[in-house]
Image (cartoon, coloured by chain):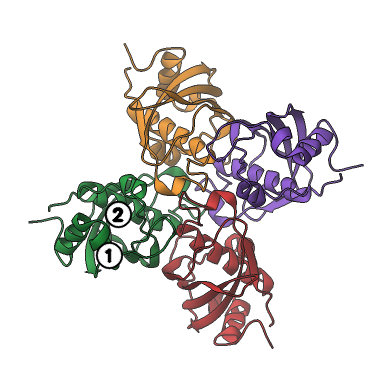
Chain colours: A green, B purple, C orange, D red
Amino acid sequence: MVLKPFYRRTLYYETDKMGIVHHSNYLRWLEEARLDFLEQVGFPYDEMEKDGIMIPVLSSMCQYKHAVRFNETVCIKMHLEEFNGLKFRISYVVTDKDTDEIRLIAETAHFFVDSNLKPIRIKKIKPDIYDCFNSAVGKDLYNE
Amino acid sequence: MVLKPFYRRTLYYETDKMGIVHHSNYLRWLEEARLDFLEQVGFPYDEMEKDGIMIPVLSSMCQYKHAVRFNETVCIKMHLEEFNGLKFRISYVVTDKDTDEIRLIAETAHFFVDSNLKPIRIKKIKPDIYDCFNSAVGKDLYNE
Amino acid sequence: MVLKPFYRRTLYYETDKMGIVHHSNYLRWLEEARLDFLEQVGFPYDEMEKDGIMIPVLSSMCQYKHAVRFNETVCIKMHLEEFNGLKFRISYVVTDKDTDEIRLIAETAHFFVDSNLKPIRIKKIKPDIYDCFNSAVGKDLYNE
Amino acid sequence: MVLKPFYRRTLYYETDKMGIVHHSNYLRWLEEARLDFLEQVGFPYDEMEKDGIMIPVLSSMCQYKHAVRFNETVCIKMHLEEFNGLKFRISYVVTDKDTDEIRLIAETAHFFVDSNLKPIRIKKIKPDIYDCFNSAVGKDLYNE
């Protein structure tokens, strides 16, 4: 598994009157990066939802290191820190595409639920998703 | 039926780097004003949805007369221009609460649908909603 | 001038509990398409802003023909309907990338302002932008 | 100093297709609660900005305990955990207005900057803001 990083350019309406990206938008970018990850590993989120599986957010943590401005592009790389079949935790490093300077350090935790928002053991329902997450834990996803 | 106008203060994250409210947010304010109207006339939208009735937007038209800034409060008054049991059309005048200057002139059109997004005749399903809309058409809703 | 259409995939957070894209987001997609147009014709908006030129929205009109869902990709093509050196008007056709079905028909009007939001004649300040807009009026921008 | 808690009702467009509030919006609600706090203690944020003082976010942490749905109203209470004249840290407890059940536990850290985003010592520039924050640290702000 070798992933491509997720690139995201700031949209105009994501800035606020301070002239920088409003901090709430970074959580949206991280979600985009997660969905891109799921697509790259072969489990697009729209298909998971059709199968009745959803992945809500349990917690988030962001350290805003440096403001991102309009039209700047960031590179988001993620790392699967923990996974136990029920929950998982991802860390993110968000850097400027051109300068490599860090913009954001973040972490989110998630669990698998069914369409009634009840927690599920993914190994029973979708063993291939379990295997994929299990093999990704602790690995550098962007180099072999 | 005498309505209270809907007041809305600009939130910080609704501004963009131009220092004014991003124009996409006004459509959100109009939606808030519509839901406030439904609540004032006794048909809160969350209960309508539980009954399987939804009211999507068919079209919208906005004339942005004057920028709204952070912390300014606007007053939204609406007028039910047309209603035929299937569709309705609302016009809005958005003014500054303090100066009465016009900020936005707008119009939205809607129809009633069931939970499969199929159009419905509201008179058959909810005659009291039909009667309410019918009695409001063309009236000044804010004065007897 | 031969433009590439602007493609945009629905993001998860752009949906609402109706399961479809919230209608306010389309105005944001149109803005993205406009900024992509400016970039393609050689006048990126961030550079225009650095030169003290901004392009606020005067009015918008949207006809929501068919709901767009999560993960669907739309194709946005625009047409410069009018331009007089002070103001311009753009129409948009938004179609599904895969089926070519129409999702949205829209129109926005704009004017050029300086950093104090005062209208400017673009011909005097930036003749090359004037020439570009002038040559694009009424043309099919996606075929020679 | 006895504050009123900040109440916030879910808006329709804040939900996503999961039928619950998209988690990114909670950071926006916390910002609203902070600006309400500043207003209650006599330092409205729009006036601070006119004086060239801004308060960016350094970090955020959210534990999403229970999903919030459309039309539910939450109560946000904050606690000033730390303040040293340069930075401060706030914790939040977000509960359902009707049931008192916890929805969200959160924390944000901030610093004071000037209009060039350079850190400032608030005691030198605005001693009354310094005194206010200093007297609020560690206190229960909602009871004498």
- Relative to C21, say whether D121 is above or below: below
**Residue C18 in view in this figure:** yes
Quadrant for residue A82, please give it.
bottom left
Residue depicted at 23% across the width and 68% down the height: A81
Q: Residue at x 10, y 56 (%)?
A: A143
The answer to whether A42 is drawn above or below residue C92 in the figure is below
Across and down, in percent, residue C38 comes to: 39, 29
User: Residue D123 location, x and y as percent?
Assistant: 55, 80
Quickly name the residue at label 2: A34
User: Do the residues under discs 2 and 1 have CB atoms within 8 angstroms?
Assistant: yes
What number is the disc on residue A14?
none
- Residue C42 visible here: no
Q: Which residue is mark 1?
A: A90
Q: Position of residue C29 (x, y in %)?
A: 45, 36
Q: Please report whichever mark, 2 or 1, sits nearer to the chain's N-terminal start.
A: 2
Q: CA distance from mark 2 to mark 1?
A: 9 Å
Q: Chain of mark 1?
A: A
Sort mark 1 into few (<14), some (14-19) or many (20+) by Cα contacts within 10 Å. many
Q: In the figure, D114 relative to C22: above or below?
A: below
Residue drawn where x is 19% and y is 55% of the image = A128
For the residue marked with disc 1, what is the amino acid?
Ile
> Is A83 on the left or on the right of D134, as rendered?
left
**Residue sitting nearer the eye, A42 or C125:** A42
Instruction: Name the secondary structure under disc 2.
Output: helix
Task: Decide: few, some or many residues near mark 2? Use Cα within 10 Å; few <14, some 14-19, many ≥20.
Answer: some
